[in-house]
Amino acid sequence: MRRRAVGITTAAVAVVVAAVALPLFQPWRLLTDRVVDEALPGTAPISTTSSSTTPPTVSAHPAKPTPVVKPQPKVLLTGKLITHEHRTSGTVAVLALPDGGRVLRIENLDTSDGPDLKVWLSDAEVTPGRDGWHVFDDGAYRSLGSLKGNHGNQNYPIPADVRLDTFRSVAIWCDRFNVSFGAADLKSA
């Protein structure tokens, strides 16, 4: 009878622990990926397909098309992501857009999926290894939003009131556990 009571109590505790731990830690995210491939801001995607079934017409006097040169984004700051809590690689760039806006561009991102991941600008120095895992919320930081995907290329608008000279790094930050998955120092381009 006593063994049965111990078994039931153990099972009940295991169920309660699982009910709390699974939503908190979300261990299945270690096996999932979200791929995002956004175009570089200010550039138009090139399409080589057409939905028209009508053959093109040829003019007797073809006019030379005038090339349209669109202004390109200007690279202000760049950096390379390093690994912290989870293996992370890719590059970051702060771009000034032709319309006057600014965007943080992350390219070739490769990191783990995780709960509550954010993209932060921070005044913290990027430190390799465990010493760099928890420093990004110690001083000034600004969240640019949730990480859109753990693989690929993505853009994060930088609000007009953000002074870039205040920030020196970018962090992929797990807000739930207050730890950096990876980070990059921002250097002048």
Image (cartoon, rainbow, N blue to C red):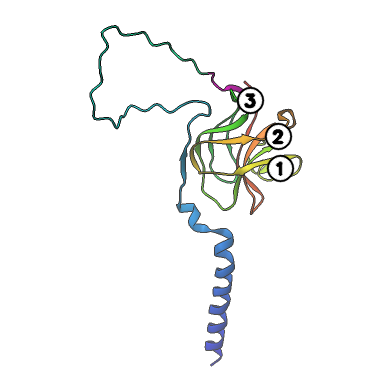
Q: Residues within 10 Å of mark 3 (few under 14, many from 20)?
A: few
Name the mark on residue 147.
Answer: none
Residue to which mark 3 is pinned: 100
Q: Residue type at mark 1: give it.
A: Val
Look at the magenta stretch and give its main secondary structure. Answer: strand
Q: Earlier in the sequence, mark 1 or mark 2?
A: 2
Residue 121 placement (x, y as % from top left): 67, 37
Instruction: Look at discs 2 and 3 and give the one toward the viewer.
Output: 3
State yes or no: discs 1 and 2 in contact (Cβ < 8 Å).
yes
Q: Earlier in the sequence, mark 2 or mark 3?
A: 3
Q: Residue furthest front?
A: 60
Reply above or below: 39 against 64: below
Q: Residues within 10 Å of mark 1 (few under 14, many from 20)?
A: some
Q: Residue type at mark 2: give it.
A: Glu
Q: Relative to the observer, which residue lies in front, 163 or 141?
A: 163
Q: Residue furthest top?
A: 61
Q: Residue at x 56, y 22 (%)?
A: 73
- Picture quadrant where residue 93 is located: top right
Instruction: Look at discs 3 and 1 and give the one toward the viewer.
Output: 3
Residue 148 placement (x, y as % from top left): 53, 44
Q: Viewed as shown, does residue 133 lie left or right of 29?
A: right
Q: Earlier in the sequence, mark 3 or mark 1?
A: 3
SS category of the residue bearing label 2: loop
Reply above or below: 2 against 17: below
Residue 63 placement (x, y as % from top left): 35, 8
Task: Please give the range of residues in magenta.
Answer: 71-78
Name the mark on residue 135.
Answer: 1
